[in-house]
Image (tube, helix red, strand yellow):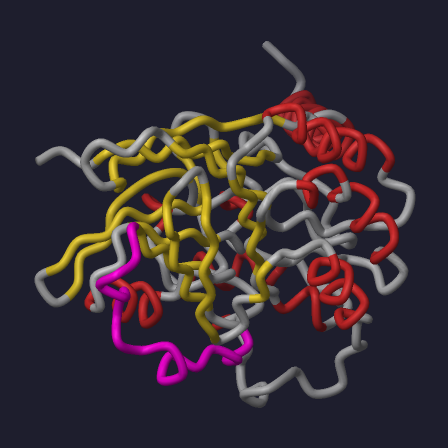
Amino acid sequence: MRPLYSVPLGVAATGAACLVYAAGYEVRSFRLRRVEVPVLPAGARPIRILQVSDIHMVTGQAKKQRWLQSLAGLRPDLVVNTGDNLSDPLGVPATLDALGPLMDFPGVYVFGSNDYYGPARKSPTRYLKALRSGVHGLNNPDGSGRRGITGAVHNPWQKLRDGFDAAGWLDLTNTRGRLSVAGLDIEFTGLDDPHIRRDDYSAVAGGPSPDADLSLAVVHAPYLRVLDAFTADGYPLILAGHTHGGQLCIPFYGALVTNCDLDTDRVKGLSTHTAAGHRSHLHVSAGCGTNRYTPVRFACPPEATLLTLTPAPR
């Protein structure tokens, strides 16, 4: 018969091993996800979109920088950055360096809350409270003002914006823009981060322009109010990030939280969303970083996604 103390010791040893794996290996085990989305007009040739999200750059993350730089070898037709580039007020130069080769390609971007505000230490008990209450996310604004978070440290997001703009990337902060990509006139409609209530759908409402070959919606956090609005207006594809894919997942089960009101079944990857009799494709990136104070991932490797857009079936 095993000694009684062997059971808790065994559990502790397993937990320690999982923590070492999550913090020492998986959080740096960068992957490329590939998906195909049938949204192009008939006869169009496929278009490849590289989506990067939730980089959460901290100064000194050389491996992450090299991996992001290497993605330029994919030679995408378009880069979409869905926000939360920073997790360090000093991280702008490293972020621009990491994304530098990708900025040789056409691109669009939106920001997330961590681009505007520095991260804060948070108690792990909030994670457990979210599970007990049935809430799908953590760190919701909880009374913060529409335009910001009271008492938060401000990141130098303007320098990040200036770097992206200088490279010709389109800023989609509560606005629309257009690019010619692989011979197609693509319209983009973007929102500022719903997670901190900076989104203003009234500024972009009205749906896709009839003269565009394709219209795409871009937002950082996939809150249902935003997904409903984009879908009801008829956008065929919505690109988002924010969730980290759940970040700490259970093997063969999946994510426990999404950090917003999206259900856990759609926490990452390609799915669909239905509203007002319309259906949109939704792609949520699990992102390639973490908050600097919770640098762990489990059963949810960091990633970027190469989306190949193909003609929609007739």
| Quadrant housing residue 200 | bottom left
Q: Point out the residue furthest to the front here.
A: 183
Q: Which image quarter holds the C terminus?
A: top left
Image location (x, y in percent) of residue 137: 47, 61
In the image, residue 199 lies in the stretch drawn in magenta: yes
Between 104 and 3, the residue placed more toward the observer is 104
Reply above or below: 29 against 140: above
User: At 77% from the left edge and 43% from the top edge, which residue is drawn?
Assistant: 100
- Magenta span main SS: loop
Image location (x, y in percent) of residue 49: 48, 38
User: At 56% from the left edge and 27% from the top edge, which residue is drawn?
Assistant: 32
Between 188 and 300, the residue placed more toward the observer is 188
Q: Point out the residue furthest to the top here.
A: 1
Reply above or below: 296 against 75: below
Reply above or below: 283 against 149: above
* Left or right of residue 172: residue 73: right
Reply above or below: 303 against 209: above
In the image, residue 130 lies in the stretch drawn in magenta: no
Q: Which image quarter holds the N terminus?
A: top right
Per the rendered image, the range of residues in magenta is: 196-213
User: At 63% from the left edge and 13% from the top edge, which residue is drawn?
Assistant: 2
